[in-house]
Image (tube, rainbow, N blue to C red):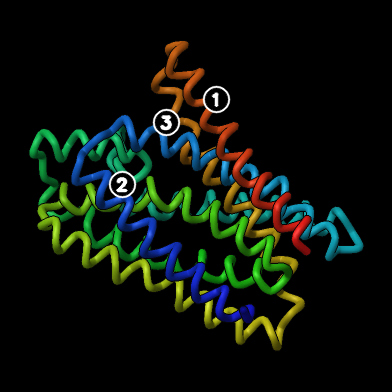
Amino acid sequence: MSTLSWIILASLLGGVLSLLVAAILTINTRASWLSMLVSYAIGALLGAAFLNTLPEAFELSENPIQVTSIVLVGILLFFILEKLVLWRHCHLEDCEVHDPTHALTAVQDHEHDDGRSGMMIVVGDTFHNFVDGILIAAAFMVDVQLGIVTSIAIIAHEIPQEAGDFVILLNSGYTRRMAFLMNLLSSFATLVGGVLAYFMLHKMDFLILPLLGLASASMIYVAMSDLIPGLHKRPEIKATIQQVALIMFGIGTIWLVGDVFSHGH
């Protein structure tokens, strides 16, 4: 299968599969499933960043400080981007953008915010999906194994994010059908980003290294800044053991996939 075929398949799966699972979760409105997925996603993101994407970036670079500098700048960049979204969107105390289970509870309680959140979420998610497509393409252009591992990590964190977006749209007064269609359209930005990046990176392959660094920064930032703080809201021992086990399972999935494909090459 060609590199472009892998990119198209991974981009479509990444967008559509994560949205379908998210929709099923939110229709069943099980907040506990969502929190379990968040724990798994943390493991998948950290595993992909530290076991695959960063090592590949170090292999491509002759200067390790170049890679770590890109990651450092990337983390700061994502912090600033997130601040811009928060300034435009979040309430002072509880922000449902970063707490899908909070948004889910609001939907169950039939609370609506009169459409304040909906369009901001769709615009932000479309941009996010476009960037995901670029990162998927950059990974596949280095190696199929890296592309698959990166795609798994992106799909894993997209599910709780899409579920959060879905319930925020419901919370904004959209019907389930409209919320699903808006998220579906937004998910195609992954495919657009992936295909555009494939043709651009063929001519500008010097961008692959910084993109791998930014992909690592994105995964680390999302896991540590957006997802982990939500787990601290359940400090009891049983919940903590479950969270640690699911994080380890996420890391293990990435390690296993990487191991299988490295032996296959």
Residue placed farthest to the right in the image?
62
Q: Name the residue under label 3.
A: 230
Q: Which residue is drawn at 70% across and 88% down?
A: 203
Q: Is mark 1 on a helix, strand or loop?
A: helix
Using a 10 Å C-alpha cutoff, classify the residue at mark 2 as few (fewer than 14 neighbours), some (14 to 19) or many (20 or more): many
Labels 2 & 3 near each other (Cβ < 8 A): no
Residue 199 position, x and y percent, is 61, 86
Residue 178 position, x and y percent, is 15, 63
Labels 3 & 1 near each other (Cβ < 8 A): no
Q: In this view, does 2 lie to the left or right of 78?
A: right
Q: Which residue is drawn at 22% across and 57% down?
A: 118
Q: Mark 2 points at which residue?
A: 164
Q: Mark 1 points at which residue?
A: 244
Q: How many discs mark residues in the rendered view?
A: 3
Observer-nearest residue: 70 or 218?
A: 218
Q: Which amino acid does label 2 sit on?
A: Gly
Q: Distance between the residues labelled 3 and 1?
A: 14 Å
Observer-nearest residue: 142 or 74?
A: 142
Q: Residue at x 31, y 40 (%)?
A: 100
Q: Is mark 3 on a helix, strand or loop?
A: helix
Residue placed farthest to the top in the image?
237
Residue 226 position, x and y percent, is 47, 41
Q: What residue type is labelled 1?
A: Val
Q: Is residue 236 left or right of residue 31?
A: right
Q: Distance between the residues labelled 2 and 3?
A: 13 Å
Q: In this view, does 10 lie above or below 196?
A: above
Using a 10 Å C-alpha cutoff, classify the residue at mark 3 as few (fewer than 14 neighbours), some (14 to 19) or many (20 or more): some
Instruction: Identify the image quadrant of residue 36.
Output: top left
Dot 2 or dot 3, earlier in sequence:
2
Residue 80 position, x and y percent, is 52, 53
Q: Which amino acid does label 3 sit on?
A: Gly
User: Label for residue 151?
Assistant: none
